[in-house]
Image (cartoon, rainbow, N blue to C red):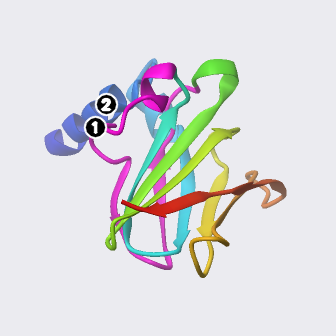
Amino acid sequence: MKKSIIYLITMLLLCGCNATGTDNAKSNTVTLINEVKDADIWILPKTEENLKTTVWGKATVSGIKINETCKAPLCEAGENGFYIIRMIDTDNIFYSVDDLVLKSGWTVRIMGDDLQSVKLEVMDESGVLKNIYDVFAASL
């Protein structure tokens, strides 16, 4: 139990969350569906610092397998209420999406068959499609 609490607090600090308590932190999650490749995924607030670096700290979700679904902690949004997503798969392909609008309880689905067709869908808590984002993908 202590390890779980320490892990949660560490994730919140690395993510820059401003949760008022652990109950609030636990409820601030999105469902993440990975339909592309096994990967590490970062969901970060959009800030100048996060946009200008390639070192984002510990992944929000580490080692998510293809066709796996999990809950991911959602930090406080960055500039103008936006998030960014960064993903690096096991083949060293880098994926990037900026200017995402996300809310707790929503679902993020990353999908695509090749580098030119990768998309990211965002659905609200009722499953209503909110937006589809083009994903930049390139080999590192």
Residue 46 location, quadrant: top right
Tell me residue 19's x, y (percent): 45, 22
Residue 126 location, quadrant: bottom right
Q: In the rendered image, is residue 50 in sight? A: yes
Tell me residue 128's x, y (percent): 84, 58
Q: Residues within 10 Å of mark 2 (few under 14, many from 20)?
A: some
Q: Nearer the viewer, residue 121 or 17?
A: 121
Looking at the image, residue 87 lies above or below residue 52: below
Looking at the image, residue 43 lies above or below residue 112: above
Residue at x 32% of width, y 71% of height:
90
Magenta part of the chain = 48-77
Q: What is the CA distance from the residue labelled 1 to the residue labelled 2? A: 7 Å
Q: Which residue is mark 1?
A: 57
Q: Nearer the viewer, residue 58 or 27?
A: 58
Give the amino acid at mark 2.
Leu
Tell me residue 95's x, y (percent): 50, 57
Q: Return the mark for residue 14.
A: 2
Return the disc, 1 or 2, that comes first in the chain's sequence.
2
Q: Quadrant of the N terminus?
A: top left
Give the amino acid at mark 1.
Gly
Q: Nearer the viewer, residue 53 or 130?
A: 53
Q: In the rendered image, is residue 103 in sight? A: no
Residue at x 69% of width, y 20% of height:
80
* Residue 127 located left or right of residue 5: right
Residue 139 location, quadrant: bottom left
* Residue 80 located left or right of residue 138: right
Residue at disc 2, secondary structure: helix
Q: Are marks 1 and 2 in contact (CB under 8 Å)?
A: yes
Residue 71 magenta-highlighted: yes
Residue at x 64% of width, y 71% of height:
116
